[in-house]
Amino acid sequence: MCRACADGRQKAILGTMSQMPSVQLKPKEDTRIRGGHPWIYDNEIAAINGNPSPGSEVVVRDSRGKQLGYALFNPASKIQARIFSRTSSRADTAFFIQAFQESLAWRARFFDLEKASFRAVFGEADSVPGLIVDLFNGKSASDGRHGRWLSAQFLSLGVDQRKSNIIEALQKVFKPAGIMERSDAPVRKLEGLEDSTGILSGSVPDSIIIEENGLAFSVDLLGGQKTGWFLDQRANRAAAARYAKGRQVADIFCNQGGFGILCAAKGAASVVCVDSSNEALKAVQENADRNACADRVTTLSANAFDQLRTFEKEGKKFDMVILDPPAFAKSRSSIPQAYRGYKEINVRALRLLNKGGILVTCSCSHWFDDALFDKMLLEAAFDCGKRFRTIEERSQDLDHPIVSGYQESRYLKVRIVEIL
Ligand code: SAH
């Protein structure tokens, strides 16, 4: 490029940048942002300059005017700006392509990209605030056709507005046969968005069969919970199943049997799967058949709190109990109530176990951090007069990266303990 052209381009870039509206922080509010956190809350903002339209790019500045990064603006949300880059000013198709290529390169280090199913984009932790994309390699349950399908959640205004750029970038990087939208999560309301579900591109079978830990599981991309399958527990299921041989197992909050069926396949004497969703339990039975372990798997449709109490009343004992509840703490204010909920199910599960029994206990709420979870578990054991040895302390699988400065990305806690 000649000198004059280069100067002209430089001027054009500077021109765009100076025109870009900005969000200026109050003094001291920049520390968390400099540490890597991508969210700017409404009460941290001193001034909004240049009248940005909802969903548009804004420059984020500290109280002295120093530039911190570029964010997508949403005046309707408590999180008024979400930083998508510290260097690129536009969240356009080219930006998404680069972000997706980087997220894919990370997964390629751990997963077989042609065979595995994995979370392909994990929102802020992959630099695309509010976008969740799960990738399923598998075959159609109805016609056996092999393919790759995506299930996407657009959970912020910024990515919702850029749906067409994102679809284009997803197609280019992941080359799916179809993309399903599952933007039916409650957090959409906090962004001022209605639910939205359906096929975004190509075609998506009603049900697909994926392979995980050597077994086959059905995934319903439209009707299943969240994106259809809880991929974050993949490695934890394998870890838990290592202890299952010969044991009587209770898989509480089983969803489609990700833990329980693997335990059965690895030699558990019996597995009872408990969930309040009848659709999930239907899938458990199908998955048990599919993996030739239906003779040892039974399902119970019940509220887990009630069922744990019933087991106790009946004098039922297990050698292994798995607790994988939904997030009980959905906000800071609900932490005390969540603590009581987690403690109750853990106390009840511990009472069902004798010496040598294994408890696999999980919490997927980022509000409920590791320290609190461990404190709860200790108290639960103390309250029922039991002690335990911790065998494994685990978190989410590697396709849900944990990034520094954004503590919300560290959300899953799993403890595997043995009763002493
Ligand atoms: N363990 C599962 C994921 C569990 S997700 C896996 O490995 O895939 C949480 C599950 O808890 C959901 O299937 C939901 O239907 C169920 N659930 C939520 N509240 C419940 C309750 N009170 N009693 C029983 N099941 C409940």
Image: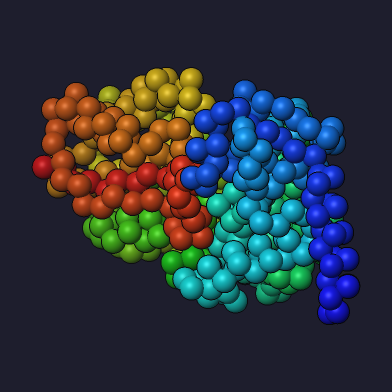
Q: Quadrant of residue 308?
A: top left
- Identify the residue at horizontal 55%, vertical 31% (top origin): 29
- Answer left or right for 409 relative to 374: right
- Answer left or right for 394 relative to 221: left
Query: Farthest residue toward the bottom?
Result: 1
Between 307 and 86, which is closer to the camera in this rendering?
86
- Identify the residue at horizontal 75%, vertical 34% (top origin): 74
Instruction: Tell me residue 334's x, y (percent).
Output: 47, 22
Between 309 and 108, which is closer to the camera in this rendering?
108
Q: Is residue 275 visible?
A: no
Q: Is residue 414 visible?
A: yes
- Identify the residue at horizontal 50%, vertical 38% (top origin): 32
- Answer left or right for 305 relative to 64: left
Q: Quadrant of residue 151?
A: bottom right
Between 183 and 275, which is closer to the camera in this rendering?
183
- Identify the residue at horizontal 68%, vertical 33% (top origin): 24
Which quadrant would the N terminus be assigned to in this image?
bottom right
Instruction: Tell me residue 132's x, y (percent).
Output: 64, 51
Between 74 and 105, which is closer to the camera in this rendering?
74
